[in-house]
Image (cartoon, rainbow, N blue to C red):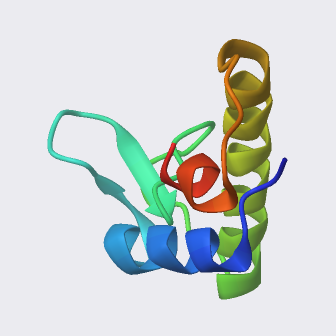
Amino acid sequence: MQTSQRGIDLIKRFEGLRLTAYDDGVGVQTIGYGHTAGVKPGMTITADQAVQFLREDLHSAEHDIDRLVTVHLCQHQFDAL
């Protein structure tokens, strides 16, 4: 199962979009829609790159949900996880 467009839109709304790296308040450099892997201070990206990072981050999370959750999930339940 994959995150639906509705789920992606919800993540975007809650995360917000930042095209320049920032400290998330606990010392973790963050960019885009909450992406942290490989982010360096002063780094900048485009909106398209932010969406790509989000999709890559979701792929990892989706894999974990598929692997760890053993009950049937409806799409909205999967999106919430």
In the image, taking residue 42 as reference, residue 6 lies left or right, namely right
Considering depth in this image, is 36 or 77 the residue closer to the camera? 77
Q: State how many labels appear.
A: 0
- In depth, the one of 8 and 51 nearer the eye is 8
Residue 64 percent across, percent down from the top left:
71, 23
Residue nearest the observer in this picture, 62 or 25: 62
Image quadrant of residue 79?
A: bottom right
Residue displayed at 54% across by 61% down: 43
Viewed as shown, does residue 46 lie left or right of 21?
right
**Residue 10 image offset from top left, x and y in percent:** 47, 75
Give the answer, above or below, for where 39 lies relative to 54. Answer: above
Residue 18 in view: no
Identify the image quadrant of residue 49.
bottom right
Residue at 55% in and 80% down: 9
Q: Is residue 25 visible?
A: yes
Residue most extreme to the left: 25
* 13 to 32, vertically: above or below: below
Q: Position of residue 30 (x, y in %)?
A: 42, 51
Image coords of residue 57 (percent x, y) = 68, 46
Decide if residue 52 is on the left or right side of residue 80. right
User: Residue at left 65%, top 71%?
Assistant: 50
Whether residue 75 is situated above or below residue 40 in the rendered picture: below
Residue at 68% across, 14% down: 68
**Residue extending furthest right?**
1
Residue nearer the viewer, 67 or 26? 67
Q: Residue furthest bottom?
A: 47
